Image (tube, rainbow, N blue to C red):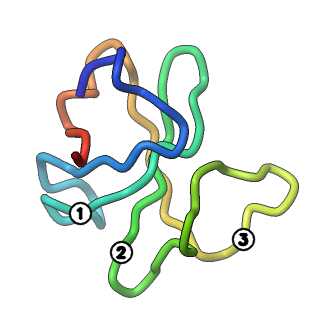
């Protein structure tokens, strides 16, 4: 994934096995904080709600596993779902 492809609500896929996230798992970019992004994973036992796009700090909900990725050197662990 390239930094220019980052959009809140963008679906992405893991390109490597991550802790608790199998390679090929899809998720959503749900937060962009200057140096990185957060991905909410759509796992079989922990599905994201239909149409989920953005993290709500006021009402985070119990349904998500989220991981942060540094823009400087971790975006290659993700690819955009086309």
Seen in the picture, residue 74 relative to 30 is either above or below; the reply is above
- The residue singled out by tag 2 in the image is 43
Q: Nearer the viewer, residue 73 or 55?
A: 55
Q: Secondary structure at mark 3?
A: loop
State if disc 3 and disc 2 touch (CB < 8 Å): no
State if disc 1 and disc 3 touch (CB < 8 Å): no
- The residue singled out by tag 3 in the image is 61
Q: Residue furthest bottom?
A: 45
Residue at image x 45%, y 39%? Answer: 68
- N-terminal of the pair, mark 3 or mark 1, is 1
Residue 75 pos. (x, y %): 27, 27
- N-terminal of the pair, mark 2 or mark 3, is 2
- N-terminal of the pair, mark 1 or mark 2, is 1
Q: Separation of disc 2 and disc 3 at Cα?
A: 15 Å
Q: Is residue 22 left or right of residue 74?
A: left
Mark 1 Cα-neighbour bin, 10 Å: few <14, some 14–19, many ≥20:
some
Residue at image x 48%, y 24%? Answer: 36
Task: Please tell me the numbered disc located at residue 14.
Answer: none
Task: Please tell me the numbered disc located at residue 25.
Answer: 1
Residue at image x 87%, y 54%? Answer: 58
Q: Secondary structure at mark 1?
A: loop
Figure quadrant of residue 63? bottom right
State if disc 2 and disc 1 touch (CB < 8 Å): yes
- Considering the image in quadrants, where does the N terminus appear? top left
Seen in the picture, residue 64 relative to 53 is either above or below; the reply is below
Seen in the picture, residue 68 relative to 42 is either above or below; the reply is above
Q: Is residue 5 left or right of residue 61?
A: left
Q: Is residue 51 left or right of residue 16?
A: right
Residue at image x 27%, y 63%? Answer: 21
Q: Secondary structure at mark 2?
A: loop
């Amino acid at each position: 994934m390239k930094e220019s492809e980052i959009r809140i609500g963008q679906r992405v896929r893991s390109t490597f096995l991550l802790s608790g996230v199998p390679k090929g798992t899809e998720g959503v970019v749900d937060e962009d904080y200057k140096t990185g992004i957060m991905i909410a994973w759509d796992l079989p036992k922990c599905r994201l709600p239909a149409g989920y796009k953005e993290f709500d700090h006021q009402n985070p909900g119990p349904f998500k596993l989220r991981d942060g990725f540094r823009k400087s050197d971790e975006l290659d662990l993700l690819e955009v779902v086309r």
